[in-house]
Image (cartoon, rainbow, N blue to C red):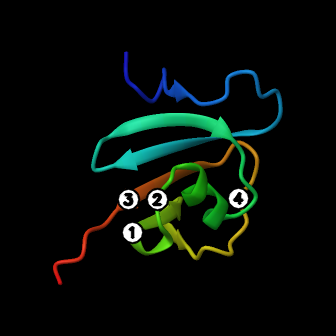
């Protein structure tokens, strides 16, 4: 049984559209109510825009890009080596 098949469900009472998110480097999966923009997804995950990349099917999404119902997204946290 993989965590993708049984993701952690955020706001299970939400009956509207949802998205599936793979968080890296933790390799955890979340199911959450669909945000409309990539920026809103990062806000929902409490991650700053400058701290993570969001991708859909291998394509990086800028913060203003639309997220669709039932999307499967990757959120990859990045750290500055400053």
Q: Distance between the residues labelled 1 and 4?
A: 19 Å
First in residue order: circle 1 vs circle 4: 1
Vertical side of 57 occupied by 20: above or below: above
Query: x%, y% of residue 56?
Result: 55, 60
> Which residue in the structure is indicated by mark 1?
51
Helix, strand or loop for disc 4: loop
> Which residue in the structure is indicated by mark 4?
67
Task: Tell me which corner region of the image, top left, top right, bottom left or bottom right, holds residue 78.
Answer: bottom left
First in residue order: circle 2 vs circle 4: 2
Mark 3 touching mark 4, by CB under 8 A? no
Vertical side of 20 occupied by 5: above or below: above
Query: x%, y% of residue 68?
Result: 74, 54
Nearer to us in this view, 10 or 54? 10
Q: Which of marks 2 and 4 is in front?
A: 2
**In percent of the image, x 76 and y 46: which residue is there?**
69
Q: Which of marks 1 and 4 is in front?
A: 1
Q: Distance between the residues labelled 2 and 3?
A: 10 Å
Label of residue 76 in the image: 3
Mark 2 touching mark 3, by CB under 8 A? no
Nearer to us in this view, 59 or 36? 36
**In percent of the image, x 75 and y 21: which residue is there?**
13
Residue lying at the far left of the rendered structure: 81
Query: x%, y% of residue 43?
Result: 58, 58
Residue lying at the far bottom of the rendered structure: 82
> Which residue in the structure is indicated by mark 2?
47
Residue 46 shown left or right of residue 14 in the figure: left
Q: Distance between the residues labelled 2 and 4?
A: 17 Å
First in residue order: circle 3 vs circle 4: 4
Mark 1 touching mark 2, by CB under 8 A? yes
Vertical side of 13 occupied by 56: above or below: below
């Amino acid at each position: 049984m993989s965590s993708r098949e049984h993701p952690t469900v955020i706001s299970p009472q939400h009956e509207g559209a949802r998205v599936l998110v793979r968080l890296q480097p933790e390799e955890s999966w979340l199911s959450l109510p669909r945000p409309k923009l990539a920026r809103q997804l990062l806000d929902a995950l409490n991650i700053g825009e400058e701290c993570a990349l969001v991708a859909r099917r291998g394509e990086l999404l800028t913060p203003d890009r639309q997220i669709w119902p039932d999307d499967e997204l990757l959120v990859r946290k990045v750290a500055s080596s400053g």
